[in-house]
Amino acid sequence: MIYLRKKNNAISIFIVAIVTIVAITNCYAFSLWGYTPQSGITYAPIGFHWQNYLEGRPQPNDMNHIVALNYKSLVVGTFIDSYQNDLARIYLLAFERNIINRKKFKMSYTVGLVYGYRGKLAQVSDFQNPILQDLMKGDINPWAYLTFKYHLNRHFALISMLTVNYLTVGIKLVF
């Protein structure tokens, strides 16, 4: 019963966050640093944890199957957590903004929230700072990454996403 209550609270917080982000993105008085990215669908199936490879430990699962949809600056997505072969489904809600906006090359930052790690991010060695550990203990955690996009044509781009300890590659279909 307590587990269901916690799960319902987390879902309620997630829904409130979605409504808040949609309201903020539609507010003309509010502007984030950077340019509005092109809307599209991203699929990035392959990635790896830096730490495992630097320490010579192979990663048990390199297939994360990141799927994300962005409408202007609002991003919703999901991926499979591959760290320590957990294979949990993770959900993302975030803002994305381009900081380099050239014809073929674009670079963006994305900040937001993820749900699904069940507090396990606090155990990752990259988050050993006490303040970061407190942020990473809960069901909903902060998240940030950089995305590098190389546009092959108007509607298709190769992408690479980089977090604190993870790199993934894939494609983006631009609307």
Image: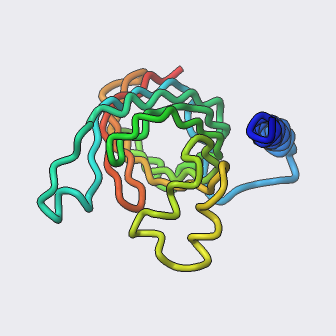
- Residue 114 quadrant: top right
The N terminus appears in which quarter of the rendering?
A: top right
* x then y, percent, for residue 11: 77, 35
Residue 133 image offset from top left, x and y in percent: 57, 70
Residue at screen point 65% across, 40% down: 93
Left or right, residue 123 beside residue 93: left
Residue under the image location 45 percent in, 53 percent down: 146
Question: In which quadrant is the C terminus drawn?
Answer: top right
Measured as percent of width and height from the top left, residue 79 is found at 47, 33
Question: Which quadrant holds residue 54?
Answer: bottom left
- Residue at x 57%, y 79% (from the top left corner): 130
Query: What is the x, y in percent for residue 7?
Result: 74, 37
Q: Above or below — where is 171 with respect to 122?
A: above
Q: Residue furthest front?
A: 1
The answer to whether any part of residue 26 appears in the image is: no
Residue closer to the observer: 138 or 76: 138
Residue lying furthest bottom? 130
Horizontal side, residue 5 vs residue 62: left or right: right
Residue nearer the viewer, 146 or 76:
76
Q: Is residue 28 above or below residue 137?
A: above
In the image, taking residue 171 as reference, residue 35 lies left or right, namely right
Q: How many marks?
A: 0
- Which residue lies at the image location 67% right of the left edge and 50% below the top edge? 140
Q: Is residue 175 left or right of residue 17?
A: left
Q: Quadrant of residue 13?
A: top right
| Closer-to-camera residue (106/68) | 68
